Image (spheres, rainbow, N blue to C red):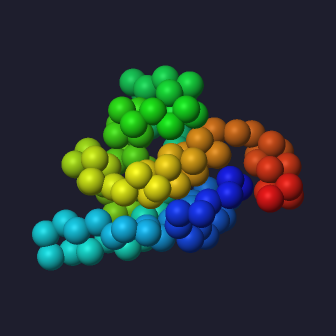
Amino acid sequence: MPKNTAATISVNANFVTVTLDEPLQRGDTVITTIQLRKPKAGELRGVSLVDVANLDVMALQKVLPRITQPILTTQDVNNLDLADLMALGAEVAYFLAKKADRNMVSQTV
């Protein structure tokens, strides 16, 4: 798993929970953690995998609402602290790797 200095991360094979450094305010609700689910191929429609792997903000604006709990809106993604956006994007990119490659990265971190 990629090193992350911005947020606390909990992992299982298909889900990752990221604790935000800067919580999101949505009305009266404060969002402090976001759970990411490993995307299926259809959830990546309309985005370039290269853009997702390169943490392109526009690609993340499309993908994150499809795989997050609570569901992030485009406006939520726009309001994320940069370190938190990088943490979420890095986890999405990490999901793109084959399981064997993810295991190798986890063993070296």
Dividing the picture into quadrants, the one containing residue 11 is bottom right
Horizontal relation, residue 81 to residue 87: left or right: left
Q: Position of residue 65 (x, y in %)?
A: 34, 48
At a point 48% along the width and 70% down the height, the residue shown is: 19
- In the displayed structure, would residue 50 be above or below residue 23? above
Q: Position of residue 69 (x, y in %)?
A: 39, 62
At a point 41% along the width and 52% down the height, the residue shown is: 82
- Label tally: 0
The residue most toward the left is 27
Image quarter where the N terminus lies is bottom right
Q: Position of residue 32 (x, y in %)?
A: 38, 73
At a point 59% along the width and 63% down the height, the residue shown is: 5
Residue situated in front as seen by the camera: 73 or 109? 109
- In the displayed structure, would residue 32 be above or below residue 40? below
- In the displayed structure, would residue 107 be above or below residue 95? below
Image quarter where the C terminus lies is bottom right
At a point 28% along the width and 47% down the height, the residue shown is: 78
Can residue 38 be seen by looking at this rendering?
no
Q: Position of residue 94 (x, y in %)?
A: 64, 46
Can residue 46 be seen by looking at this rendering?
yes
Horizontal relation, residue 39 to residue 109: left or right: left
Dividing the picture into quadrants, the one containing residue 46 is top left
Residue situated in front as seen by the camera: 24 or 100? 24
